[in-house]
Image (spheres, helix red, strand yellow):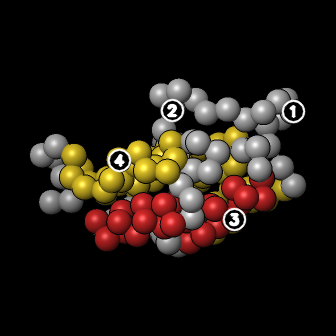
């Protein structure tokens, strides 16, 4: 149902490098690009994550209560993406592990601009 998520950035080149490296862990690559916008994805018909220089020219700010969740197909990929985010300078917002008894396994982090993300899978 979701087509894409866009995160604002105040340092476009730094954010592009962060997401190039982070999303490569799950096989995503740039699928659309302009001087102010980049979108990453795994295939043409899947949801995408993008960064943008705000159109209004104002500073990008973090949305309070806003979070982007990236789904993967294994706990190992959750661990890998979370660890890569921290390695690239992201900030921990909740270490990887199970949440509740439903099989939800996730790790939470903030990117270099302070946007909150998580990576998760549903396990048996």
Q: Which residue is mark 2?
A: 66
Secondary structure category for the residue under label 2:
loop
The disc at residue 17 is 3
Relative depth, front residue between 88 and 99: 88
| Residue 12 location (% of width, % of height) | 77, 53
Secondary structure category for the residue under label 4:
strand
- Quadrant in which the C terminus is drawn: bottom left
Q: Which residue is mark 4?
A: 94
Give the residue drawn at x 48%, y 28%: 65
Give the residue drawn at x 78%, y 33%: 59
Secondary structure category for the residue under label 3:
helix
Query: Callout 1 environment at 10 Å: few (<14), some (14 to 19), or many (20+)?
Result: few
Using the numbered discs, state the Cα–Cα distance from disc 4 to disc 3 in whole angstroms: 23 Å
Q: Nearer the viewer, mark 4 or mark 3?
A: 4
The disc at residue 74 is none
Using the numbered discs, state the Cα–Cα distance from disc 2 to disc 1 in whole angstroms: 21 Å
Which mark is first along the chain, 4 or 2?
A: 2
Q: Nearer the viewer, mark 2 or mark 3?
A: 3
Q: Is residue 123 left or right of residue 61?
A: left
* Count of all numbered marks drawn on residues in the image: 4
Which mark is first along the chain, 3 or 2?
A: 3
Which mark is first along the chain, 3 or 1?
A: 3
Q: Is residue 79 left or right of residue 67?
A: left
Give the residue drawn at x 49%, y 51%: 91
Query: Callout 3 environment at 10 Å: few (<14), some (14 to 19), or many (20+)?
Result: few
Using the numbered discs, state the Cα–Cα distance from disc 1 to disc 4 in whole angstroms: 32 Å
Query: Callout 4 environment at 10 Å: few (<14), some (14 to 19), or many (20+)?
Result: few
Q: Which residue is mark 1?
A: 57
């Amino acid at each position: 149902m979701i087509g894409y998520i866009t995160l604002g950035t105040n340092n476009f080149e730094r954010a592009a490098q962060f997401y190039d490296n982070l999303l490569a862990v799950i096989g995503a690559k740039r699928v659309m690009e302009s001087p102010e916008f980049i979108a990453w994805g795994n295939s043409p018909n899947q949801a995408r994550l993008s960064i943008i220089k705000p159109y209004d020219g104002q500073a990008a700010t973090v949305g309070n209560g806003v979070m982007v969740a990236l789904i993967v197909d294994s706990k190992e990929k959750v661990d890998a993406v979370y660890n890569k985010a921290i390695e690239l300078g992201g900030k921990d917002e909740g270490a990887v592990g199970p949440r509740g008894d439903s099989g939800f396994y996730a790790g939470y982090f903030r990117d270099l601009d302070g946007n909150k993300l998580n990576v998760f899978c549903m396990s048996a």
